[in-house]
Image (tube, rainbow, N blue to C red):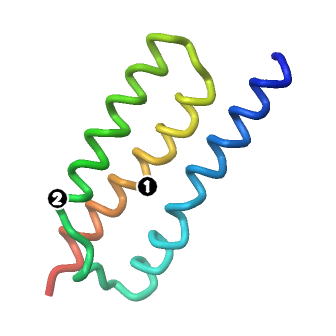
Amino acid sequence: MQWIDYVGLFGAVLSSVTFVPQVIKAWQTKSVGDLSIWMVFILIANVSTWLFYGIVKHDIAIIVANSIILFLSLLMLYFKISFKK
């Protein structure tokens, strides 16, 4: 790997980590009432598209970032559906 690949992986980790506090808060409070389900659907479509692109291009940074974000987005969708009152 070249140094720029490490920069890309670092960026991928930072991008992915931005979702962690929201997932933790939703899990702890069991509250996602203010979360737009349409935003979650759009996010899932977005990262799925980027993940496909990364796989086709064999770009590990894009694959890592979007795999993690897709997992966290699906988790938020699960919370949105299951935490309804």
Query: Which amino acid type is marked by label 1?
Result: Leu
Q: Nearer the viewer, residue 7 or 73?
A: 7
Residue at which label 2 appears:
38
Whole-percent x and y of residue 21? 54, 72
Q: Quadrant of residue 34?
A: bottom left
For mark 2, give the secondary structure.
helix
Whole-percent x and y of residue 83? 23, 78
For mark 1, give the secondary structure.
helix
Eyeballing the image, is 48 above or below 79?
Answer: above
The structure residue drawn at horizontal position 38% and vertical position 22%, both measured from the top left corner, is 52
66 relative position to 59: left or right: left
Q: How crowded is the residue under tag 2: few (<14 C-alpha within 10 Å), some, or many (20+)? A: few
Q: CA distance from mark 2 to mark 1?
A: 15 Å
Eyeballing the image, is 36 above or below 47?
Answer: below
The structure residue drawn at horizontal position 18% and vertical position 68%, both measured from the top left corner, is 81
Eyeballing the image, is 57 above or below 80?
Answer: above
Whole-percent x and y of residue 82? 21, 72
* Label 2 vs label 1, nearer the camera: 2
Residue at which label 1 appears:
72
Which part of the image, by quadrant, shows the N terminus?
top right
55 relative position to 18: left or right: left
43 relative position to 41: left or right: right
